Image (cartoon, helix red, strand yellow):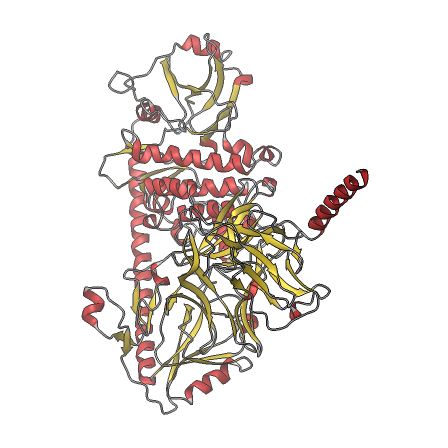
Amino acid sequence: MDAITHLFVYSIFFSLFRISITQNSITPSQSIRDGGTTLVSADGSFQLGFFSPGNSNSRYVGIWYTVSSETVVWVANREASLSDHSGVLKVTDGGILVLLNSTSGVVWSSNTSRTVENPVAQLLDTGNLVLKDRNDDDPEKFLWQSFDYPCDTLLPEMKLGWNLVTGLERFLSSWKSTEDPAQGEYSVRIDLRGYPQSVSMEGDSIKTRPGSWNGLRFTGYPQLRPNPVFEYEFVLNEKEVYYEYKLHNTSVFSRLRVNPSGVPQRFNWVDRTQSWELFFTSHTIECDNYGLCGGYATCNTNKSPVCACLEGFLPKSPKNWDSVLDWSDGCVRRTPLECNGRDGFLKRTRLKLPDTSSSWYNKSMSLKECEGMCLKNCNCTAYTSLDVRGGGSGCVLWFGSLIDISEYSNSESGQDLYIRMATSELEHLEKKRRSAEIKLVAIIVSSALLFVGMTIVALVSCIWKKKLKTQGTTKISHGKEDMELPMFDLAAIANATDNFSNNKKLGEGGFGPVYKGKLPDGRDIAVKRLSKNSKQGLNELKNEVILIAKLQHRNLVKLLGCCIQENENMLIYEYMPNKSVDFFIFDQAKSKLLDWHKRINIIRGVAKGLLYLHEDSRLRIIHRDLKASNILLDNNMNAKISDFGLAKSFGGDQIDSETNRIIGTYGYMSPEYAVHGQYSIKSDVFSFGVLVLEILSGKKNRGFCHPNHHLNLLGHAWKLWIEDKPMELIDELVGNSCTLSSVLRHIHVGLLCVQQRPEDRPNMSSVVQMLTSESLLPKPKQPGFFIDSPTTDFSGKHGTSSANEISNTVFEAR
């Protein structure tokens, strides 16, 4: 009896031992049953087993991430589901992977053509399921692998493209729906016609076209730039044509998926939130639609209308082009080609190259040889370099119409294209260009003369006004119609602040000193005392009281009352124990206390406070002096906007206004306000953008210094953005508390807010949405005050002034 018991125990032990040592593979003597064991890759990243998608009752064999079992990256029997839980996955003695149903019928099998003596199916750490000989790990000798038959997900080291020797095409195809993994109507492929290019298909038609590879990226994917998460490459040789990406850190999970709607999206796994975070989405703008503008036309989302004929071309159907905005017929040449060896080429820059399906290419030719080759063929319409690296190499020639061209505003995006033109057309375009340059010079000269005249008039007027100005004091009315606030007794305030002791002094701003006090009821207060030497006076105090008295928002500092007595003018606020934002971010030691989450919480708090001022308060209020020192922090480091002395209220329908007295803080002023005295809610948006970049970088915009250039912080941030190095902007003291996507989103929003033109900047409701959601963001344009000297001063006392910093108004710095 004991012998039987021991034999039973040993059998269980060896059974468990066998499962544990073969958990990432199975042999012909083993199987994977529905509801039983699963395969797990050696590093634990991926798992293979049976599953049902969504609310479906159908059963499939799939591979998913261990950290997210709902994220299925590959399905074996996507076209042949099982109706019950009787499925079995096994390897035959001949080395074929088969999926059997309840009657042992084959539901799905691998298309293995060779056999080996010791076949094994193994789930690799990459997520690749392979069939191989047990003792042979050479990928070239695998019998079969799931990476050769992608579904809707491209994993690291998975190839997207063609094996030219076997004719095998590896492409992504969407699921039919979230509950049906069968092949949907959308796919992403490498088109081999002409010079190979990436295309997204809807059925048999091209939906979007990421374009051809230029040595660095697909020309239609300007966002495909070097980053700290992964690297990518495009291989084109006699045996293979494919695209793939590899992770810098294999512990990071990143995947590219085509969703059931046909939109390719990249997701990165975030350990902190235990969720997938959207890294980027393609097909997000109108110009992504294939052939939107027809032949010989460019698409530019920053222009209206988005479509325009190439220079030297005219709309083929002018009526449709202008009246119904139907550009599908494209454009035609204004002057036919001569095709006698005398044609020339017009160079266009920053373009997504045209559809290459009707092109020819050579990897070794020079650009000059490429031009000569094109001139020899009457059907050749354009040429360019195949590879832009190292000054350019190789040749691509186009034959026939040039279709699906986009134009980028960023000089780092797109590529040069040389378009064939008749000599007479090129001469016409050159004369037109010279005429435009002459007109521009004339405008600049006349504007300069006008400016000098206006400046002289303004100076004379200013001097005259100062002579006529009478001295005296302005009385402030504090009746109920102006202020509905408690009036504090001077003696009580003096007692609360130890008679305005220096030990109680919190700081000093343009208004005057600020003291900490404690009222008899135990409340801590902050007392702003109007300085007799302050440039701000009773009018500013009255303005602040009137505007803020009835404002109630968690991100605005609360005004408790005021004291106007015996030539003293004071405002009493709730006390903020953590002082202001600049107290932390511009201090090497204290900035360590602001991790990433605190910083973005401050940014979002300021955004919500501004949104309330601009849209939700009883008056539309423009702060006009938003800066780091005016953002106070409570016990929980929540942001509260303060100092409304310079604020202005607008009527409900009023958009902007002008002033001849420009007061604010250098470094935070918007261009239109500093130069022309025009202010609007977009002026505050600009200041907010500066503040965002300061909080992210820990550097001041005004006085920023970099060893490699003389740009201010805005210019530095823009330079890093267009060079695809935005992470270098982030304060190194933030450490590892931030995520890449969150960093990029906040920098992106900051740059959108500091754009030169007010109409390009988002309003605060859009900003709040951008900061608190995963919505798609428009491309930022160059910021305002993109200056060359960190010491530039609008007053002209330091450094040199640039054109957009000259004004005929009087500046008063704080």
Q: In this orientation, which residue lies closer to the viewer: 557 or 120?
A: 120
**At which x and y percent is residue 407?**
38, 65
Is residue 396 in view from this perspective? yes
> In this picture, is 400 found above or below 583?
below
Q: Using the rendered view, name the quadrant where residue 613 is placed.
A: top left
Is residue 789 in view from this perspective? no
**Which residue sits furthest front?**
1
Q: Using the rendered view, name the quadrant where residue 144 is placed.
A: bottom right
**At which x and y percent is residue 411?**
45, 63
**At which x and y percent is residue 725?**
54, 54
**Which residue sits furthest right?**
3
> In this picture, is 11 found above or below 448?
above
121 on left or right of 813 = right
Q: Residue at x 64, y 59 (%)?
A: 122
Quadrant in which the N terminus appears: top right
Q: In this orientation, which residue lies closer to the viewer: 183 or 520?
A: 183
How many marks the image carries: the answer is 0
Q: In this orientation, which residue lies closer to the viewer: 57 or 704?
A: 57
Q: Residue at x 40, y 72 (%)?
A: 354
**At which x and y percent is residue 366?**
53, 81
307 on left or right of 642 = left
> In this picture, is 580 found above or below 696?
above
> In this picture, is 250 found above or below 320?
above
Quadrant in which the C terminus appears: top left
Q: Residue at x 50, y 32 (%)?
A: 581
Q: Using the rendered view, name the quadrant where residue 782 is placed.
A: bottom left
